[in-house]
Amino acid sequence: MSASANTIGQARIVLVTVESLREARRIANSLVKKKLAACVNIVLSPVTSIYRWKEKVEVAHEYFLVIKTTTRGYPALEKEIARLHSYEVPEIIALPIAAGLPEYLKWLRASVDRSSKS
């Protein structure tokens, strides 16, 4: 397997919704500072979420996070999001990255390498 194919297989996009912009920024900063995520995009315009919760249909305005990490780093990232998140059951969904610019994926992996001091 080539190095770039290996890097692709290890990359993940994690989708999370949160109650407020303040919460989004708090979670994003913690994930990047702790090298659990290479990058977190915060969608600044609230998204409207319609969902079923405790047998009722709910409507909420939430902020959406797009988080870049690795398969290896995902368990610690999930734990940190759950620790910081205000919801009883937060949306934390990880998707594999099927393809991407090799240089970007190399940067992503290096950015969440917790063994390095940078």
Image (tube, helix red, strand yellow):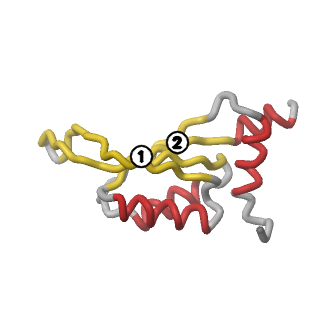
Q: Is residue 99 above or below residue 59?
A: above
Q: Is residue 118 above or below residue 69?
A: below
Contact, mark 1 vs mark 2 (Cβ under 8 Å): no
For mark 2, does the 10 Å Cα neighbourhood hold few (<14), some (14 to 19), or many (20 or more) residues? Answer: many
Residue nearest the viewer, comparing 20 with 17: 20
Query: In percent of the image, x 73 and y 41: which residue is there?
Result: 105
Q: Is residue 96 left or right of residue 55?
A: right
In the image, what residue type sits under mark 2? Ala
Marks 1 and 2, how far apart at CA: 17 Å
Residue furthest toward the front? Answer: 45
For mark 1, does the 10 Å Cα neighbourhood hold few (<14), some (14 to 19), or many (20 or more) residues? Answer: some
Pick the quarter of the image with the C terminus. bottom right
In the image, what residue type sits under mark 1? Val
Residue nearest the viewer, comparing 71 with 98: 98
Residue 99 visible? The answer is yes
Residue 91 visible? The answer is no
Q: Which residue is mark 1?
A: 43
Q: Is residue 64 left or right of residue 96?
A: left
Query: In percent of the image, x 35 and y 54: which residue is there?
Result: 18
Place of residue 108 in the rendered image (x, y in percent of width and height, measured from the top left)? 70, 48
Residue 73 occupies which quadrant of the picture?
bottom right
Q: Which residue is mark 2?
A: 94
Under tag 1, what secondary structure? strand
Place of residue 39 in the rendered image (x, y in percent of width and height, measured from the top left)? 60, 52
Place of residue 28 in the rendered image (x, y in percent of width and height, measured from the top left)? 50, 60
Pointer 1 or 2: first along the chain = 1
Q: Is residue 55 above or below residue 23?
A: above
Place of residue 115 in the rendered image (x, y in percent of width and height, measured from the top left)? 78, 66
Q: Which mark is residue 55?
A: none
Pick the quarter of the image with the N terminus. top right
